[in-house]
């Protein structure tokens, strides 16, 4: 179970890293499957930095198991509410190949359009779950960069200016970024509206590997615009917590 401190950290910062969630046997099975995927469709010669595979989970039992056959999915529901989340249909295998000298200049949220676009809001989800398949114990080793608290800032922006300005790069004031570190088997849980981006990998000789799952609450698609403006719309355990004194 998540501690009160972990739930409070998620509410304030928009993400948490939960250590030692996925056991070694599930990590080993996932690693072997990633080996097979990359062998069948390897990155181009000389490729450096990010390289992704997007696979349907219904055909990838070894890749969905770290989420659903470990405590990971249940921990996500401790934030969103019991029996509220749908098992994601897709898994992203995320590689970061060294040496990659890169520092992201700004964050993004996962939106298909870089600038506001007319029409209904699409592509949002409730929570990002990431499972580390390799150790990332130091910075600049392929880590995900996050901008703490921007889940609140983005929601405030959309409340003030309207969800029609939804895009990958809303113009908001930014805090200092942080790099996510952890061991293989650690679980990242992040609010959809948290700003994040891909970091460099120049302090490590190892290709960073992670699995990312974009998880939605049941009925999410029916209220995307409201969700953009109400940070805790789909996080009832956080919404119902007593306000800090």
Image (cartoon, rainbow, N blue to C red):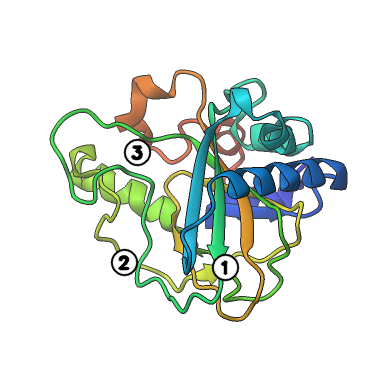
Q: Which residue is mark 3?
A: 228
Q: Which residue is mark 1?
A: 142
Q: Is residue 162 left or right of residue 29?
A: left
Q: Which residue is mark 2?
A: 173
Instruction: Measuring from the top left, give residue 234's x and y in whole percent.
Output: 50, 30
Mark 2 or 1, closer to the camera: 1
Instruction: Measuring from the top left, give residue 96's x and y in whole percent.
Output: 54, 63
Q: Secondary structure at mark 2?
A: loop
Q: Is residue 2 left or right of residue 203?
A: right
Instruction: Measuring from the top left, give residue 197's x and y in whole percent.
Output: 44, 61
Identify which residue is drawn at 81% across, 46% down. Answer: 28
Q: Is residue 226 above or below residue 111?
A: above
Mark 1 or 3, closer to the camera: 1
**Would you call the spot at circle 1 few (<14 residues within 10 Å), some (14-19), or many (20 or more)?**
many
Quadrant of residue 166 within the rendered picture: top left
Q: Is residue 62 above or below residue 5?
A: above
* Image marks 1 and 3: residues in contact by CB distance under 8 Å: no
Identify which residue is drawn at 75% across, 57% down. Answer: 184
Q: Earlier in the sequence, mark 3 or mark 2?
A: 2
């Amino acid at each position: 179970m998540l501690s009160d401190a972990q739930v409070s950290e998620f509410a304030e910062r928009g993400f948490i890293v939960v250590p030692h969630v996925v056991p070694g046997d599930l990590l080993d099975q996932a690693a072997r499957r990633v080996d097979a995927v990359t062998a069948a469709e390897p990155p181009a010669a000389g490729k450096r930095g990010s390289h992704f595979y997007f696979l349907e989970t219904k055909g990838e039992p070894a890749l969905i198991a770290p989420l659903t056959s470990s405590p990971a999915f249940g921990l996500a529901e401790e934030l969103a509410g019991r029996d509220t989340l749908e098992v994601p249909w897709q898994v992203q295998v995320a590689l970061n190949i060294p040496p990659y000298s890169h520092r992201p200049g700004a964050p993004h949220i996962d939106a298909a359009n870089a600038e506001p676009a007319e029409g209904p809001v699409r592509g949002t989800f409730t929570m990002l779950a990431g499972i580390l398949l390799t150790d990332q114990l130091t910075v600049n080793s392929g880590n995900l960069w996050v901008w703490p608290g921007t889940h609140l800032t983005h929601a405030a922006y959309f409340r003030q200016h309207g969800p029609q300005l939804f895009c990958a790069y809303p113009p908001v004031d930014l805090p200092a970024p942080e790099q996510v570190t952890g061991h293989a088997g650690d679980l990242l849980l992040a609010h959809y509206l948290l700003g994040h981006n891909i970091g460099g990998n120049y302090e490590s000789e190892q290709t960073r590997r992670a699995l990312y799952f974009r998880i939605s609450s049941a009925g999410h698609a029916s209220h995307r615009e409201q969700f953009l403006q109400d940070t805790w719309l789909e996080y009832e355990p956080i919404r119902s917590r007593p306000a800090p004194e």
